[in-house]
Amino acid sequence: MQPALVRLTPKGAATRARIVETAADLILARGAGGTSLDDIRAQTATSKSQLFHYFPGGKGELVAAIAAFQSERVLAAQRPFLDTLDTWQAWDSWRDAVLAHYCSQPHWGCPIGALAGELIGSDPARGAEVTAYLDRWRGYLEAGLTRMCAAGLLRADAQPRTLALATFAALHGGLLLTQTMQSGEPLAAALDGALTALRAAAA
């Protein structure tokens, strides 16, 4: 909980949101460890006192706000398909939405996965908070597959949790190669392979 948020005026809330969005892109490019508060101040044109007014917990609080912002941005790009995923058509549309989102970004790769990977080693507590966003994301996949099982679209012995985890792993493996190769081709191949594996479990 961040009590300071309650006291913000509409203008103040807009300023805070601008700082988060600008800093998010900076940290995505340089990493959390490679980005100082001075870097963020310069990029966002804010003073030290102004920055600490909006983020009294310092850089850690700002990183947490960035993780929440990136999570919502990534999930929003997959909607409305992410909220269903209980038909094959929904899965195909989800695949297209994921590919379109990441191929349109100036920086390849997943901002949530990159941030979680960096923080797990340097700041385990903060890293666990970011990892929770990944778990939430994976949960949407599992929920859709659970509904497909209940509707008889998957075999009776299908395991939604395992299938969702395999699909999510394929997605992030594709994102890693997409980042290193600077191309959407690995992500497309990973998603297509994951959906082929899902269809193999069809009733």
Image: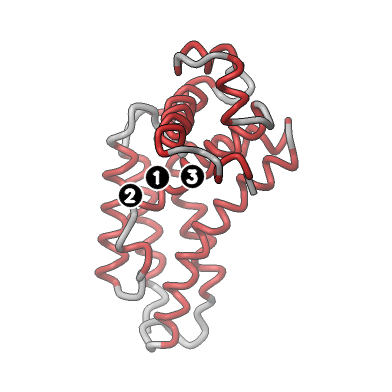
Q: Position of residue 111 (x, y in %)?
A: 48, 37
- Report if the CB atoms under discs 2 and 1 are less than 8 Å apart: yes
- Report if the CB atoms under discs 2 and 3 are less than 8 Å apart: no
Look at label 1 and name its amino acid. Arg
Distance of label 2 from label 3 (alpha carbons)? 19 Å
Seen from the viewer's position, the closer of residues 135 and 73 is 73
Q: Is residue 118 visible?
A: yes
Q: Which mark is residue 173?
A: 3
- Relative to 95, say whether 145 is above or below: below
In the picture, measured across the screen, residue 115 lies left or right of residue 152, that is: right
Q: Is residue 180 visible?
A: no
The residue carrying pointer 3 sits among few (fewer than 14), some (14 to 19) or many (20 or more) residues within 10 Å by Cα, namely some
Question: Where the C terminus falls, by quadrant?
Answer: bottom left
Q: Position of residue 191 (x, y in %)?
A: 36, 53
Look at label 3 and name its amino acid. Gly
Residue at image location 34% in from the left, 54% down from the top: 78
User: Which sits earlier in the primary sequence, circle 2 or circle 3?
Assistant: 2
In the picture, measured across the screen, residue 54 lies left or right of residue 188, that is: right
Query: Which residue carries the number 1 mark?
Result: 73
Residue at image location 32% in from the left, 58% down from the top: 79
Query: Which residue carries the number 2 mark?
Result: 77
User: Which sits earlier in the primary sequence, circle 3 or circle 1?
Assistant: 1
Q: Position of residue 162 (x, y in %)?
A: 56, 68
Exactly how many numbered labels are in the figure?
3
In which quarter of the view is residue 11 placed? top left
Q: Secondary structure at mark 2?
A: helix
Residue at image location 47% in from the left, 52% down from the top: 170
Distance of label 2 from label 1 (alpha carbons)? 6 Å
